[in-house]
Image: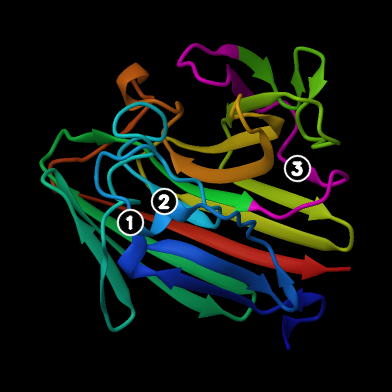
Amino acid sequence: MTGSTGAPAVRAVTDPAHGGRWTSLRAGAREWLWHRDEPRRADVRPGDAFADAGGLEECLPTVRGMPDHGDVWARPWSRDGGTESVATPDFRLTRRIRDRPDGLTADYRLTAAPGYRFLWAAHALLDVSPSARLGIADGAPARLYPDGGADWTPFTWPDAGGVRYDLLGPDDGTALGAVVGAARVSVHDGADTLRLAVEAEGQPVSVALWRNLRGFPEHAPYRSIGVEPMLGRVFDLGAAGEGDAAEVPASGEVRWRLTVGATRA
């Protein structure tokens, strides 16, 4: 079934009991989310080190730093009709995913004390081939992060100091992160294209990328590709400078939207 010519219907499946994790993002017959066996994932608690089982994890209020990958991926969510939500001592987050003829939208609402600063990332790990490529407007400002650190170096998309970051390529033993000043990204893999976009009035938006070509972790490296629309411009909230993080205004709430679409040639 397709929503329009060349546009397969996009459907998501989530797991509220386990951090609100997206366990499936399917466009027609194609499953876009990558998974790996991680026995710790089912029993995590707030404050635990990240248990990387793949899928799409909601990272908030940080990605790197403390708590590791944020404070909502390790908490049970509740579901009321079509709305899913989670609460922490500092904020409450709600999410509603709706199907559209050309994809789906996920609408978010965070309520917290005015002035509360946070990062959010839709930490999507994708099942793509080494020939896949990323589409972001050339010339976008970007920050390159080596694995395991908060320090970054600037570059202009897609040339990261001689590395074409838009080309995923075969495994080479590296693990690099990047945050690109863009609101939308496309992932092209063979005949299939996945498109992700984020919008949030008055807040900084970016696309975070994780290109792990069997460079992480050191003791048992594996391949994983993260394409992560986000609010904010850094991975670690603790390293966020002026304008690098989302901030709750006087109204006490921030709203944003994630849009997902797909096409098949």
Left or right: residue 118 versus residue 89 is right
Q: Which mark is residue 178?
A: none
Classify mark 1: residues with Cα within 10 Å, few (<14), some (14-19) or many (20+).
Answer: few
How far across and down, in percent of the image, does residue 147 sit? Answer: 57, 21
Mark 3 in CB contact with mark 1 (< 8 angstroms): no
Secondary structure of residue under mark 1 = helix
Which mark sits nearer the N-terminus, 3 or 1? 1
Tell me if residue 161 is in the magenta stretch.
no
Identify whether 16 is placed above or below 184: below
Secondary structure of residue under mark 2 = helix
Q: Which residue is at 38% across, 59% downward? A: 42
The residue at which mark 2 appears reads as 40
Q: Which residue is at 34% across, 30% downward? A: 245
Q: Quadrant of the N terminus?
A: bottom right
Left or right: residue 66 versus residue 221 is left
Residue range corresponding to the magenta coloring: 126-153
Classify mark 3: residues with Cα within 10 Å, few (<14), some (14-19) or many (20+).
Answer: many
Predominant SS along the magenta part: loop
Mark 2 in CB contact with mark 1 (< 8 angstroms): yes
How far across and down, in percent of the image, does residue 128 sit? Answer: 76, 52
Q: Which mark is residue 134?
A: 3
Which mark sits nearer the N-terminus, 3 or 2? 2
Tell me which amino acid carries mark 1.
Asp
Left or right: residue 248 versus residue 11 is left
The residue at which mark 1 appears reads as 43
Q: Which residue is at 25% across, 39% downward? A: 47
From this viewpoint, is residue 50 visible?
yes
